[in-house]
Amino acid sequence: MNVYSLSGPSGTGKSTSALVFAHKIGVEALIDDGLLIVNGVKVAGISAKFEKNTITAVRRAIFTNDVHREEVKKALDTYKVQSILVIGTSDKMTKTIARQLELDPIEKYYYVEDVRSPKEIAKARFIRQTQGKHVMPIPYRQVEQNFFKRLVQKGKEIFSSKREKIGETTIVRPDFQQEYIDIERHVYVELLTYCCAKQNIVHKVEQVQFNFGELAQATITLQLKLPINYSLPDRLYELQKTIQAEFSQHFGYELDAIHLHIKSVVIKRKS
């Protein structure tokens, strides 16, 4: 069996990228948080995200429970798995999992930085810290919803570069995820409004829309002052950079898109 490792700190988006990465390197199966996933479908195991605290979650993830471990080992034989990607928070953890499941030695070690950009990692960390959301790389229908009292929702369908569906994700908030800071949408809107309003070319901020889904983006409608005796595209580009810098300073990650709409211009009259 060909065994590979993917590791990185919690909350950096390993599970989000795992299906695409495994498909890219030609691996059919994943071990993620206590689950055996083959071709995008859970076939054995119990997720560590079902646990009530972080200690039991770690134990579940590294297969310390005999019944759990034997179930997954049997499924590996039943499905005749030839290649597998073991996911964990460190090389030590993935080695422990491989040893517990009596897999062959790990051939190659990959890290979250190999599969995600710094921008994607920063955004994943922010979501974990402010929303407490975890991603499971299995379909929504396979998640036992009674385990999650606070949040279970569909993630996204995952496609290969050839538009072949290779799996789905589900978003959950485990019981052990107690510490997170819930930031309301109006906080983002107020920061974006303030950032634009203090620019000397802006007469009024008409509207700010902020969307934080798969893409984090802002759409801002402005009134500008006259005279426009400057390069408008250049100044708007500078404004976008200023917004991006302030947003990153306050929230720790960058917006995916900033759309500026100029509704009108206003003559500033001297009294």
Image (spheres, rainbow, N blue to C red):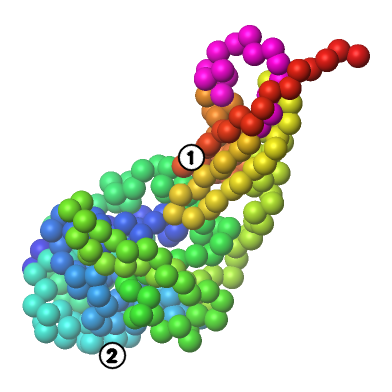
Magenta segment: does it hold 224? yes
Place of residue 206 in the rendered image (x, y in percent of width and height, measured from the top left): 70, 37
Label whose residue precedes the other's in the sequence (2 or 1): 2
Is the C terminus in the top left, top right, bottom left or bottom right quadrant?
A: top right
Residue appearing at x 32%, y 57% in the figure: 17
Residue type at mark 2: give it.
Val
Q: Secondary structure at mark 1?
A: strand
Q: CA distance from mark 2 to mark 1?
A: 48 Å
Q: Is residue 98 left or right of residue 33?
A: left
Q: Which numbered dot is residue 64?
A: none
The quarter of the picture where residue 69 lies is bottom left
Q: Is residue 79 left or right of residue 124?
A: left
Q: Residue furthest front?
A: 264
- What residue is pinned by disc 1? 257
The quarter of the picture where residue 19 lies is bottom left
Place of residue 29 in the rendered image (x, y in percent of width and height, measured from the top left): 19, 69
Q: Is residue 5 visible?
A: no
- What residue is pinned by disc 2? 67
Highlighted range, magenta: 222-236
Magenta segment: does it hold 164? no
Q: Secondary structure at mark 2?
A: helix
Place of residue 97 in the rendered image (x, y in percent of width and height, measured from the top left): 26, 71
Is the N terminus in the top left, top right, bottom left or bottom right quadrant?
A: bottom left
Q: Is residue 23 left or right of residue 130?
A: left
Using a 10 Å C-alpha cutoff, classify the residue at mark 2 as few (fewer than 14 neighbours), some (14 to 19) or many (20 or more): few
Whether residue 198 is situated above or below residue 43 in the rendered picture: above
Q: Nearer the viewer, residue 48 or 169?
A: 169
Residue type at mark 1: give it.
Ala
